[in-house]
Image (cartoon, helix red, strand yellow):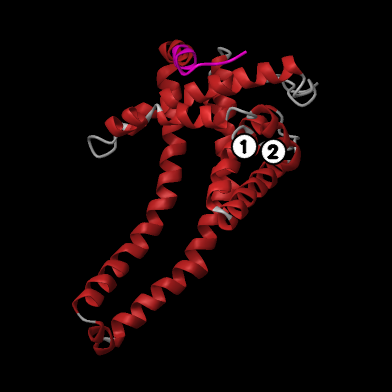
Amino acid sequence: MKWTNELLKTNAKLVLKQHYWIIFGVTLVTGLLAGASAQIGNMMLFPWSATFSERLAESPEALYESPGALFGGALILVIFFAVFLPLTLLVSFFLLNPLLVGERRFLMETREGRPDANNLLWAFQKGRYTNVVKAMLLLRLRILFWTLLFFIPGIVKSYEYYYVPWLLAENPSLDCKSACQLSKRMTDNEKLDIFFLELSFLGWILLGMLALCVGSFFVTPYMSATYTELYLFARARALENGSAEPEELPGLAPPL
């Protein structure tokens, strides 16, 4: 079985035709939370870094004539790296990552005709949260390691582990190693195809950036629904060709 961009997008449009606004609401929440976390850091660093750059461009000696500015900038950096950066990482690991997995669960349930916004908090339930947090943390560290070691392999690994959040959304008992190995088998010979699928949304993303990027929130449901179709297609093929065992991909029904 081989998917095409057109097939995935056509199926996504059928889902959106029935459930667009609830998908819009859920993806809006996760998008706003993720964006807010990133923007706070930019707001803290940008004013000082812009002032620093301007003074350095005018005259390097000007910085030594204003030690207060240097001290203030240094203090901001210390606060950022000692307080804000760790806090941001904690929010990402313990809040945003489980929400990301919950969003995947919501999208798959909606695809099956069971839209429920409460699924956004699905990964926070007892028996799921700890393993999901651990697996997503180890996933981020794996990708970071490969990116710092060699940039291009880091990109390749990010696509190799592309399905890990989806796999955890289906089977929250998977550990990081098992999920990564399963995702690796599911993306074999298709990493470049996934990249081109994402690239095919570039025009929509640019269009969504109009009106102060507000349009991006309306594009996201289309993209998310398409990526859901991608995972479900890869899942069905993995079970069919033996790349995954039924106990690894038990479906969306909770275990008895």
In which quadrant will I find the N terminus?
Answer: top right
Tags 2 and 1 touching, CB below 8 Å: yes
**Residue 26 shows up from this direction:** no
Is the residue 254 above or below the residue 39 in the image?
Answer: above
Residue 234 relative to residue 55: left or right: right
Q: Residues within 10 Å of mark 1 (few under 14, many from 20)?
A: many
In which quadrant will I find the C terminus?
Answer: top right
Residue type at mark 1: give it.
Glu
Q: Residues within 10 Å of mark 2 (few under 14, many from 20)?
A: many
Q: Position of residue 12 (x, y in %)?
A: 47, 16
Q: Position of residue 185 (x, y in %)?
A: 70, 30
Q: Nearer the viewer, residue 187 or 249?
A: 187
Stretch of the chain drawn in magenta:
1-10
Residue at figure coordinates x 53%, y 59% from the top left: 87
Q: Nearer the viewer, residue 222 or 172?
A: 222
Residue position for label 2: 180
Q: Position of residue 7 (x, y in %)?
A: 48, 12
Q: Look at discs 2 and 1 and give the one toward the viewer.
A: 1
Residue type at mark 2: give it.
Cys
Residue 118 relative to residue 214: left or right: right
Residue position for label 1: 160
